Amino acid sequence: MSSLSSPLVACTDVSKSYADGDQAIVAIGEVSMEAHAGQVTAVVGPSGSGKTTLLHLIGGVEHADSGSIVAAGVDLGELSSSEQTAFRAQHVSFVFADLNLLPVLSIYENISLGLTLLRLAEPEAHRRAMSALDLVGLADRAHRLPATLSSGERQRVAVARALARESTLVIADEPTAHLDHDLALEITALLRRLAADHGSCVLMATHDRAVADEADQVLRLEDGRRTH
Ligand SMILES: Nc1ncnc2c1ncn2[C@@H]1O[C@H](COP(=O)(O)OP(=O)(O)OP(=O)(O)O)[C@@H](O)[C@H]1O
Ligand SMILES: [Mg+2]
């Protein structure tokens, strides 16, 4: 695990704009930040402030226009799009509120699918999938189809998928959206556990103040700029 003195993610003066007709919308403007292994970093700010954009840049989904991002020892600015794909497969797990579980696969199979890119031996993949489901309290529902779970349970499957991959970097975009207060805190506790037990660096965008209060570090964006 990295020491606190060497961040797992370091962004320096990162900017990203989108074209809107002949205008440019600055989604992220000269943002610098660091995030550490074993910690949860919350990204907060109003709708449209750039949270998702920042997470996509750090997760290797999109390229920044300028500035530098180093994540898990990789300089993301240098990557071709196939290298970006390899970076995501090797280092990143995504947790979304509206997660894409395949409806015809059981939750166990959905989690196993997330492991195929890691090319694990079958017994190791099985062990990881079952222990992740156990950790989120769903081992007894492993054979169920997603449609037969409650929305909170489905969200726990999304966290289990990240747990099983044991990724260095976990990127969670509004992982507690649509959940009631208790469930939101439950999911947040699971993400904290992912950071503490696996030493993952968890980056989480959230609108929920109670969820952000649980983070080790809170980064606030307004109009694409960091305000603290
Ligand atoms: N693909 C895109 N094309 C054009 N503009 C975009 C695109 N993605 C984001 N934007 C714009 O960039 C800005 C930041 O969007 P972003 O999705 O990062 O905000 P957010 O903080 O995640 O908002 P929310 O809380 O609503 O999810 C917004 O003005 C948005 O309209
Ligand atoms: Mg967003």
Image: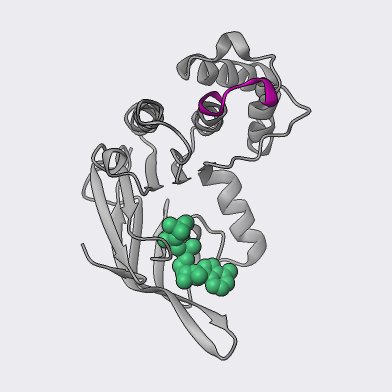
On screen, residue 39 versus residue 52, left or right, reads left
Residue at the bottom extreme, as displayed:
22
Q: Where 41 falls versus 146 (above or below)?
A: below
* Quarter residue 73 falls in: bottom left
Q: Where 223 falls versus 46 (above or below)?
A: below
Task: Say which residue appears at 36% left-offset and 49% top-offset.
Answer: 207
| Residue 132 at x, y percent in the picture | 52, 21
State the colouring used for the structure image: one colour
Q: In this orientation, which residue lies closer to the viewer: 76 or 174?
A: 174
Task: Say which residue appears at 46% left-offset and 44% top-offset.
Answer: 172
Task: Say which residue appears at 29% left-offset and 67% top-offset.
Answer: 32
Q: Main secondary structure of the magenta part?
A: helix
- Quarter of the image with the C terminus is bottom left
Q: In this orientation, which residue lies closer to the viewer: 154 or 15?
A: 154
On screen, residue 118 versus residue 194, left or right, reads right
Q: Where 42 falls versus 107 (above or below)?
A: below
* Quarter residue 208 falls in: top left
Q: In this orientation, which residue lies closer to the viewer: 53 or 57?
A: 53
Residue at the right extreme, as displayed:
104
- Quarter of the image with the N terminus is top left
Count of residue discs: 0
Residue at the top extreme, as displayed:
140
Q: Where 89 falls versus 183 (above or below)?
A: below
Residue 212 makes an appearance in the image: yes
* Quarter residue 153 falls in: top right
Residue 75 makes an appearance in the image: no
On screen, residue 36 versus residue 120, left or right, reads left
| Residue 117 at x, y percent in the picture | 67, 39
Q: Which residues are magenta?
A: 147-153
Magenta stretch contains residue 107: no
| Residue 89 at x, y percent in the picture | 60, 46
| Residue 166 at x, y percent in the picture | 49, 32
